[in-house]
Image (cartoon, helix red, strand yellow):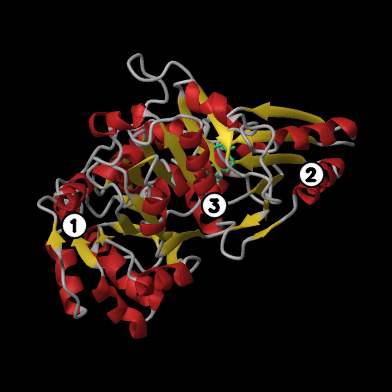
Amino acid sequence: MKGKVYLVGAGPGDYKLLTLKGLECIRKADVIVYDRLANINYLKEAKKGCEFINVGKASSHHLLPQDQINRLIADKALEGKIVTRLKGGDPYVFGRGGEEGELLKAEGIEFEVVPGVTSAIGGLCYAGIPITHRDHASSFHVITGHLRKDGKENPEINWNALANMKGTLVFLMGVSNLKNISENLIKEGMSKDTPVAFVSWATRYNQRVVTATLEDAYEVAIREEVKPPTLIVVGTVVNLRDTLNFFEKKPLFGKSIMVTRSRSQNSKLVERIMDLGGNPIEIPTIKIEKVQDNKELENEIKNLKDYTYLVLTSKNGVDIFFDKLDEMGLDCRALANIKVCSIGAATSKAIIRRGIKPDIQPEKAVGESLYDELKDIVSKEDKILIPRAKNAREFLVKKLNEISNVTEVVTYESVMDDSKKEEAINALEEGNLDYITFASSSTVTNFINLIGEENKDKLSNTKIISIGKITTKTILDNGLEVYKESEKASIESMIEAMSE
Ligand code: SAH
């Protein structure tokens, strides 16, 4: 049984510059082979158990030679696996995708190629440089700057033609050959004043653009320490950058922001940071562990007809309860004769999604408020089911039990998630973070538990953004400073505080 290979263009780096087809290939892969130019966050989209193979570690400069990469991909497919080969930009633009495809063909392995947004075009775009423009360039040429190592003239490059075609020139892999490039173009008649741009890490939060002229390009690149991966753009389209640069003007462009929330909650904040050009670093602090094979919950669901109230106090609690109903072959009709109470808006939203409008929801999402709503309507005859987290606050169950009959069933537990502990400590130590956000008092406590009291001081290198008064108090109680508290207790307001 032979597998199949997808050679997928992963785009230039911005997470959202991937095709729908590319995403589909990532999701169905058994093995993903990737290198340093493909955005590593795509791996999060892979299915459980997918094998990840990094064939180009930037840190060690230890690249697997191309023939070995070809072999690896073919071998995995011959094992019957679906292999997705993720390549930066487009697979066929100096990506050696052709060679990989040729070997697959020779071995009789089925493959497909998914084009990607090449850095040669998309990278320029994010630097505010249109690759063509009616007033500037009516053609463009994408050239490898990776010239022959023996110092001999590369016969494939016709410098005279390039210098005189008046098209935009984009050199990939050209940094180490820059001197050669600029000298050849000038020698063949290109104006010394032709604008040049160096675009490094294009479309990423750390994109950096340096401009020069053809004459001083080499000097400027040395002075400014221009390093790969960089696109070298030669042509007057570079002058449009001042007008067309939208990306670097985004309010959080270039900012690294640590986001500390439980994984299920932080997606909106992460999404907004990315939209505004920032680099979110997600550090989960707690995770939800469902009670496995929950016989107790099953029993109470079987006895639902005896209950008059169901009280739900979190989104997780709702999801676990309704998943269990579903598992038992039931649906929301099982709750037809029961009043459903929700602690607050987020919980209600989850209940509504399951086809039920909550009968009761207090304005403030706390146990005290829900108790106030219920205390005059429930009586000794009522039976109340409360499926909820282990170690939840006692108040609600205790007070309701005084006036009626409560059955509490533990359905999940919040436990420490230390999967990103090292990453969090390293990021704090490196001091490259612009902000760290805390969107609840408990995440402050959980985060400090996660990194350990002994590392707490490391937080003082970073500007702390708090969502509101209670969270601020917890931060101060820990001996830390708050850089800014958001005006309203909302994600959008936290974003505003940072954007200002
Ligand atoms: N297939 C890729 C190019 C691979 S060759 C594509 O279509 O984009 C590798 C070279 O591409 C790098 O040396 C650099 O010159 C360029 N490159 C790729 N991604 C880049 C990025 N995000 N920023 C700047 N240069 C990039």
**Structural distance between the alpha carbons of marks 3 and 2:** 26 Å
Amino acid type at image mark 2: Asn
> Image quarter for residue 481?
bottom left
Can residue 355 be seen here? The reply is yes
User: At which x and y percent is residue 312?
Assistant: 33, 49
**How busy is the neighbourhood of tag 2: few (under 14 within 10 Å), some, or many (20 plus)?**
some
What residue is at 42 percent from the left and 25 percent from the top?
Answer: 131
Q: Tag 2 or tag 1, which sits nearer the N-term? A: 2
Mark identifier at residue 176 = 3
Q: Please, what is the three-letter code of the amino acid marked with disc 1?
A: Ile
Tag nearer the camera, 3 or 2: 3
389 above or below 143? Answer: below
Dot 1: element: loop
Residue behind mark 1: 467
SS of the residue at dot 3?
helix
Q: Residue at label 2?
A: 70
Which one is closest to the eye, mark 1 or mark 2?
2
Please tell me in which quadrant of the rendered image residue 354 appears.
Answer: top left
Q: Position of residue 8 (x, y in %)?
A: 63, 34
Mark 1 Cα within 10 Å, few/some/many (few <14, many 20+)? many
In the image, what residue occupies the spot 70% across and 38% down?
96
Relative to 271, is 16 on the left or the right? right
Q: Which kind of residue does numbered mark 3 sit on?
A: Ser
Taking the image as shown, residue 191 lies to the left or right of residue 394, namely right
Helix, strand or loop status at disc 2: helix
